[in-house]
Image (cartoon, rainbow, N blue to C red):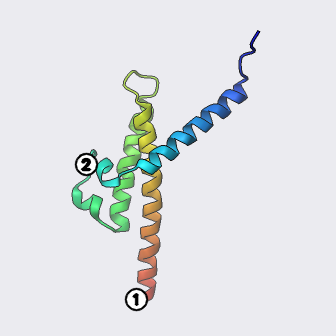
Amino acid sequence: MHNPPSSDRLRAAARKSLQSALRAKAEAYRREEFLRSFHRLSRSVIAAETPQAAAVVLKELERALRAERARAGHWTYDLTRHIALLVAHRAEQARALRLARSAHRSARDRV
């Protein structure tokens, strides 16, 4: 007779599966294409290379993540979209940090 897997093994398998999905989506992330689906974001905000524009993008992604989490358990919840939002949020956080550091260096160099 086969024993059912323990909850620890299930958790570990789920974590491994999620990490694999996040890696795959991160490799396939197309910034402009993905962000264009957010109607609140203009093309100029998406294209801007400023910390302020990056903050606007992050705020919109955070709003979308909250909405997706609120749908969890409902038939409209989409795990694929949730993963895509997580990947985009991580990528945009890294971009915002890079832009903030670059702006800080530029300001420091001007002094």
Q: Residue at x 34, y 68 (%)?
A: 50
Q: Is residue 90 above or below residue 70?
A: below
Q: Residue furthest bottom?
A: 111
Residue 58 appears in which quarter of the rendering?
bottom left
* Callout 2 crowding tier (Cα within 10 Å): few <14, some 14–19, many ≥20: few
Quick one: SS at disc 2?
loop
The numbered dot on residue 110 is: 1
Q: Amino acid at mark 2?
A: Arg
Q: Which residue is mark 2?
A: 40
Picture coordinates of residue 18 (x, y %)?
Answer: 55, 37
Q: Amino acid at mark 1?
A: Arg
Q: Is residue 28 left or right of residue 3?
A: left
Cα separation between marks 1 and 2? 34 Å
- Quadrant that contains the N terminus: top right
First reached walking from the N terminus: tag 1 or tag 2: 2
* Callout 1 crowding tier (Cα within 10 Å): few <14, some 14–19, many ≥20: few
Q: Is residue 36 left or right of residue 97?
A: left
Picture coordinates of residue 44 (x, y %)?
Answer: 23, 61
Q: Residue at x 73, y 23 (%)?
A: 6
Picture coordinates of residue 106 (x, y %)?
Answer: 41, 82
- Tell me if label 1 and label 2 are in contact, CB under 8 Å: no
Count of labels in the image: 2
Q: Residue at x 62, y 38 (%)?
A: 16
Q: Report the front residue among 86 and 23.
A: 23
Q: Residue at x 66, y 31 (%)?
A: 11
Picture coordinates of residue 14 (x, y %)?
Answer: 60, 32
